Structure formats: C-alpha cells, structure tokens
Amino acid sequence: MCTPQTASGRIRLNVGGQVFETTADTLRGAGEGTMLAAMLEPCWNAGATGGVPEYFIDRDPACFASLLNMLRTGELHVPAGVPERMLFQEASYYGLLDRVRATRIGELDLSRTRLAASVPPGRAPVDRPAVRAAPDGGCCVTHGPIVRVYNWMLEERQPVCLTPVEPVRDAVYLSDTTLLVGGRGMAAFSVLTGDLSHHFRIAHEGKKTARLFNARALAFDQQTNVFASCNNSGITPEIGYGIGVWDCITGEQTSYFFDRKYVYALTDASKLQWLASTNALMAVKACSPKDAFSPSSITLVDFRDMSVVWSWSVGSRRLDEKHVADAVVMEDERSVRLISQNHDLGFLDIRSRGSFQQPWTYQSKATTPICYPKLAVHGGLLLASKDDTISVYGGPNHDHLRLALRGSQGGGAIADFSVGGDRLFAVHHEDNVLDVWETLPPPIA
C-alpha cells in the first residue's frame, strides 16, 4: 500500500487562472494551521502521481501574488488598484491575516507619515469626541454614552455602552482585547464582542459600595494598576474623591489617594499620565471651552508613600490670563510641556519647585477656539493640534516646527488625537470623521 508523502520541492498553484510556481518551504513558512501549509500535508497529496504538484484555487490572483511575495520577502505591498479591505479578506481566506498584521506593524515615523484613511462616524456627530489608539493598530472613539470600537482593519466592531444616558469621559486600552471605560462608573469591556467584563466599585470599610462613582480621567501603568480621577456626592470626601487605584485583573480597589489641599486638582483632573521611570502619576486639571477660566493645575502623586511630590497651578481667574488646555510629561520625565487655550507652548521643569515657575514665554492674543488644543509625545517629538492640523515640534526645547499634518478636507477642527503602535488617529469636532495616518513604506534600496 502506498502511503501519501508530504509535498516537497516545487509547488505549482493556479490561482484564478494565473499560474504561480514556488517552493514547499515558502508555503510552509505561512505557519501551522494555515491553508497554504496544510496543502503540503499527505492528506492533500493522496492522489499525487509524481512530478510537480499543482493545485487550483478559485481566488483573486493579484492579491495572492502580493501574499506570496510577503512569504518570500517578509514585506507586504498592496497591488495598485486593489483595496486594502479586499487584500485583508483574501489573507483571511488563506489564514494569513495575523501574518499580514505582523508585517505591517512598525514604528510610526512622523517624518514619513501619510493620511491613509478617513472613516465617517456612521451616526450623528457629538460634541467633543475623544479618540484612543489601541496597541494592535485599532482605536476607539467616544461618542456620547457609547464608545465606537475599530479593529486594525478599521472595521467597526460592536460598540461599548457604559450607561444609556451619561456621556463617556475617558477610555484606555488594557490590552488588545480589553477596553476600560469611565464616566458614570467604570467598567472593562471585551473589544472583540462589546461584552461587559466587570464593574469597578469604590471600597469603603472593607466593602464595595453599590453606588457608582464618577470616573473622569483614566490611566494604566501597563502592568496591573488602573487609575481614575473620581468623585461622588453623598460619599465621604476621603472615600469618594481624589485618585482611585484598582487591580485590572481582579477589579478590586487597591488604594485611594485624597488630600484636601489638592482635592479639586485631583478630583477634577481631565488627564492622567503614568510615569514609568519615576513611578508617579501626573494629574492635569485643564480648562475647556465650557469652563475656560477655571484654575489650571498639574500634580504629581507618588503612591508608594501616598504623597504629592510636585505641583504647579494657576489660580487666577482673569480673562487675560493663560490657562492650560493640555499638558504632557516628556519622555525623559524631567519636564512638562503645556499648551494654552490660545495655542501657546509652555515649559515646566519637574526638578524645580513648580509653584514658582512661569511656563509661558510670551503672551498671544486671546482667542475663542472651537476646540482646545491637545498634546502628545512620540519618538522625542511633541505633537500639538490646532484647528484641522497636527503640528510636530522638535529641537532641544521642543519649540521648533518640523512639519504639519493636515486632516481630511472639510473635516473641521480636530477635537482629539492619539498615537499608538504604527498609527496616528485624529477625530474631528464638527462631523466626527476619524483620520488615520500611517508611515510610508521604506524606499527600495
């Protein structure tokens, strides 16, 4: 009895009428569990009678050529005139979708970015949406009481809903598959299905209170701890106000920081940023178009000894006073860059006493922007939004304009943007269009 043999040597494939010839080793490189690797197994070759095995696959030949070249070279090139979505569908058929994504992942090079896609919201626009980049190249966009979730192919998944009425205040990815959402309460959801994983509660006297709290800003230390600036009228101030800490795996509250001197700076913080090197949490209380003249502050909390280790604030309510629209700690964790409601950049040295520093170098003319600017840091560069453009700054003081990335035409002012993985996302205020920038492929040497 003849036992079928595993295919080896050269393989001939007829894909949609176009013949390709490759080696068994190339197909085997597709990986275990893929269709192409399975074609080499004995059960696929029971009728083989010698010579070069040939298979017919009734699929698109242009996409197959691109995928076969990826297996040969490790690089993916989308054929001219072929939509990316079609290529992804073909890759899924062959079991190569994960390989395609891995090939596409790389560092975002802002000097070689291009506007790759603009995604319409698919529902009525909302005021001041926020966008958060996912680790795998997807993202989410807050949209009133729901969160729109997109995978790395920019396909919209099942939306997430924290409460039916109250707006979502912030969201942060805990992993490729888990999204933490804050607003009237805080909960973790599956990115894949939109299902609730668990609610987070305030602990008081060893018991979790049934009453929900208001979670305004969220942060994750990339290990197990999640942080939230929160408050709740009716709960003892020391319990319901300040910064809470939870274990993201168990959902149990592990710590809480409250200081009456900084109660508003922490409770009303609109942004939290975890500083991995110094093991501190930055809380930014920024102004907004709806609350343009409230005092701005920046506070650094060390949870190891439960203390404020550095702070800075502007207490004036003068109409001509600069106020902080956003702030970000630079990657060396020695300084903070600020941006005012009038798009002026400021600087604070964390190594000096914050309360005595004057961050602004000049006074610009007061304006009333539709959207207040946002800041982010990537690869040693500072990114700042203004109107429909994201400006990229470099240099020793991060005040030298390197380039400007303009959003989609007609999208209006940028409400928020986020950098993650190999992509830059921005969501517009007026129509909530989502813009996506990617790095251009490297030039062929």
Image: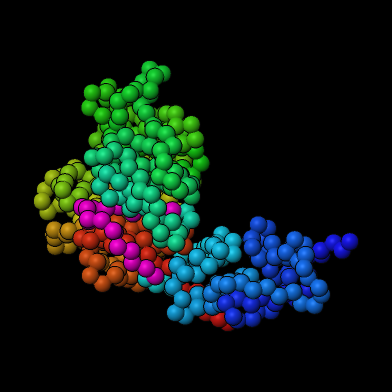
Residue 47 point in image, percent of width and height: 77, 68
> In the image as oriented, which residue stretches furthest toward the left?
319
Residue 120 belongs to magenta span: yes
Along the viewing direction, whichever of 76 and 7 lies nearer the viewer: 7
Quarter placement of the N terminus = bottom right
Residue 225: give x, y in percent of width and height. 46, 37
Left or right: residue 44 versus residue 419 is right
Question: For the magenta stretch, what is the residue range?
Answer: 116-134
Q: Quadrant of residue 74?
A: bottom right
Which secondary structure class fits the magenta region best?
Answer: loop
Q: Can residue 66 be seen in this view?
A: no
Along the line of sight, which residue is nearer the eye, 284 or 57?
57
| Left or right of residue 140: residue 41 | right
Furthest residue to the top? 205
Q: Is residue 64 above or below residue 304?
A: below
In the depicted view, which residue is nearer to us: 38 or 443?
38
Q: Nearer the viewer, residue 116 or 261?
A: 116
Q: Quadrant of residue 188?
A: top left
Taking the spot 17% from the left edge, 51% from the top edge, the residue there is 289
The reply to whether the magenta stretch includes residue 326 is no
Q: Can residue 388 be seen in this view?
A: yes
Residue 274 in the image: x percent, y percent? 42, 44
